[in-house]
Amino acid sequence: MKINMNPTLLAGAAMLMIAVQARAELVEIRFNEQGRFEHSAPVAAGKFVEICSKLSKGQALPWSFKSDQPMQFNIHYHEDKKVEFPAKLQSATSAEARLDVPIDQHYCWMWANKGSTDAQLTFSVQK
């Protein structure tokens, strides 16, 4: 039995598989009753994790993270097609600061593991 596959369909399926493999993890922040969120997870070599939440202008959120491997880190949000970075670090294993939210927007804390070994990440944020 011969099956003819549409080349456009095959190309689309291949692109979807690549996109799924490239994205390691996307986590939505869910603050507990005390206004705290904590997350701990491995970040595979060559992958990334994004932890995101809708925030309001004027909020001040203390946050911190630790990793056992250096990673690229940023906090970002999108304004139309422009990406703004309230924080950005290269080869970081830890950081602690406060995000002073400048505008109502969806904000993401993002770590990329560019190394060859998996990293263990621990993150917390308080509203």
Image (cartoon, grey):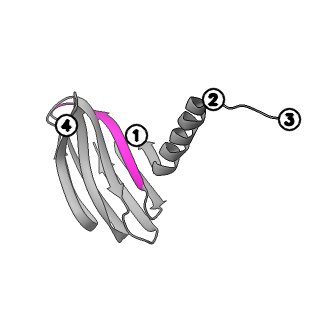
The three-letter amino acid code for the residue at tag 2 is Asn
Please name the residue that numbered disc 1 is placed on: 33
Please name the residue that numbered disc 2 is placed on: 6
Residue 24 visible: no
Please name the residue that numbered disc 3 is placed on: 1
Please tell me which residue is depicted at 68% across the width and 32% down the height of the picture: 5
Please tell me which residue is depicted at 32% across the width and 64% down the height of the picture: 71
Please tell me which residue is depicted at 22% across the width and 31% down the height of the picture: 81
Q: Total number of numbered labels?
A: 4
Foreground mark, 2 or 4, reads 2
Q: CA distance from mark 3 to mark 1?
A: 60 Å
Q: Earlier in the sequence, mark 1 or mark 2?
A: 2
Please name the residue that numbered disc 4 is placed on: 59
Q: Earlier in the sequence, mark 2 or mark 4?
A: 2
Q: Quadrant of the C terminus?
A: top left
Q: Earlier in the sequence, mark 3 or mark 1?
A: 3
Q: CA distance from mark 3 to mark 4?
A: 62 Å
Q: Is residue 88 above or below residue 61?
A: below
Please tell me which residue is depicted at 24% across the width and 43% down the height of the picture: 76
Q: CA distance from mark 2 to mark 3?
A: 16 Å
Quadrant of the rendered image containing residue 84: top left
